Amino acid sequence: MLTHGMLITNRLRETGKNGADFAKELGVTRAYVYQIIHGHNLSVGPSAMNLREAIAEHLKTSAEELWPFLKGPKNPPQRRKLHSRG
């Protein structure tokens, strides 16, 4: 089963671009690009939004279409905190 991030990655590959290309262009790490694409980083700060906008523009769509949580409230959903068993 393909995840949402995998679908974005595949669309980028079809255009001949990958996360490393965006990392170089925007001066961020490849790990950061991966986290944004795959939804591990839900930040709506300027760096994250610039990256999302650059990817969306390249794919001729909007960031909101690629990352639907951006359509909702200003604060994205929070990840569940894991509690240690102790």
Image (tube, rainbow, N blue to C red):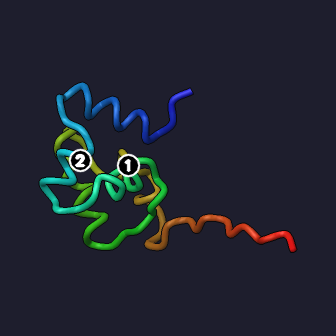
Tell me if residue 79 comes above or below residue 33 in the rendering.
Answer: below
Identify the residue shown where x is 19% and y is 52%: 54
- Left or right: residue 39 versus residue 62 is right
Answer few, some or many: residues within 10 Å of disc 2's Cα (few below 14, many 20 plus, some between 14 and 19).
Answer: many
Q: Label 2 sits on what residue type?
A: Ile
Identify the residue shown where x is 38% and y is 49%: 37
Q: Label 1 sits on what residue type?
A: Ile
Lower sequence index among marks 1 and 2: 1
Tell me if residue 84 comes above or below residue 4 in the rendering.
Answer: below
Identify the residue shown where x is 85% and y is 69%: 85
Residue 16 position within the rendered picture, expressed as x and y whole percent measured from the top left: 17, 29
Check contact, mark 1 vs mark 2: CB within 8 A. yes
Residue 58 position within the rendered picture, expressed as x and y whole percent measured from the top left: 17, 42
Tell me if residue 7 comes above or below residue 79 in the rendering.
Answer: above
* Quarter the N terminus occupies: top right
Residue 79 position within the rendered picture, expressed as x and y whole percent measured from the top left: 60, 64
* Residue under numbered circle 2: 55
Query: Seen from this angle, which residue lies furthest left?
Result: 25
Q: Which element is circle 1 on?
A: helix
Residue 69 or 10: which is nearer the viewer?
Answer: 10
Residue 9 position within the rendered picture, expressed as x and y whole percent measured from the top left: 34, 36
* Quarter the C terminus occupies: bottom right
Instruction: Report the disc number at residue 37.
Output: 1
Question: Splitting the image into 4 quarters, where does residue 23 fall?
Answer: bottom left
Q: Which element is circle 2 on?
A: helix
Marks 1/2: CA–CA distance:
9 Å
Query: Seen from this angle, which residue lies furthest right?
Result: 86
